[in-house]
Amino acid sequence: MAKLLKQFAALPVMETGGTLHVLLITSRAKQRWIIPKGHPEKGMQPSAVALLEAREEAGVCGVISKMPIGHYRTQKCLPSGKQVPCEVTVFRLDVSEHLAQWKEHLERKIMWVPLSQAAALADDGGLSEFLEGLDAAAKPKALAVTS
């Protein structure tokens, strides 16, 4: 049985006109719609890894939650082509700044979408289910829109 990989992700969010929007980015290889995520880094807290990945992959900065808002499972495609199971821990990122240029701006596209539409656009089954759960009536308080 393959070892379960772990990754930490940021779910960049911004409220616009009373609607919560999330930022989706494309993967580099297959241009699938996903969220910024990366592998654990020695000496870094999981939320700090997620924040760093959001800056490098999507060019966004802001305040990241210290506690995860959830988890999802996916299949990670290694450079060899082998698929391995991966658990992704997700942290909310309240975006306050979007950089004009960032490390991977030439490799990825970005798209802000209402949370209610994000699950249908995400090109990862585990991520889609995670986003659908956030859009349900039992939305976690961490993602509740406040006025």
Image (cartoon, grey):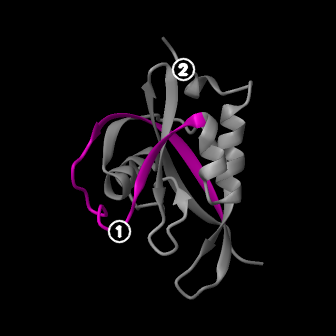
Identify which residue is drawn at 41% across, 61% down.
Answer: 41
User: Mark 2 packing: few (<14 Cα in 10 Å), some, or many (20+)?
Assistant: few
What's drawn in magenta, residue-wise?
A: 86-115
What's under tag 1, amino acid-wise? Glu
Identify which residue is drawn at 66% across, 48% down.
Answer: 120
| Residue indicated by mark 1 | 107
How many discs mark residues in the rendered view? 2
Q: Nearer the viewer, residue 112 or 136?
A: 112
Dominant SS in magenta: strand
Residue 140 placement (x, y as % from top left): 65, 27
- State the residue lying farthest toward the left: 100
Relative placement, left or right, of 26 versus 106 is: right
Quarter of the figure with residue 102:
bottom left
Label 1 element class: loop
Relative height, residue 111 to residue 141 (above, below): below
What's under tag 2, amino acid-wise? Val
Mark 2 to mark 1 CA distance (whole Å): 31 Å
- Disc 2 to disc 1: CB gap under 8 Å: no
| Residue indicated by mark 2 | 145
Quadrant of the snapshot with the N terminus: bottom right
Identify which residue is drawn at 45% across, 20% down.
Answer: 17
Relative height, residue 3 to residue 23 (above, below): below
Label 2 element class: loop
Q: Nearer the viewer, residue 66 or 129?
A: 129
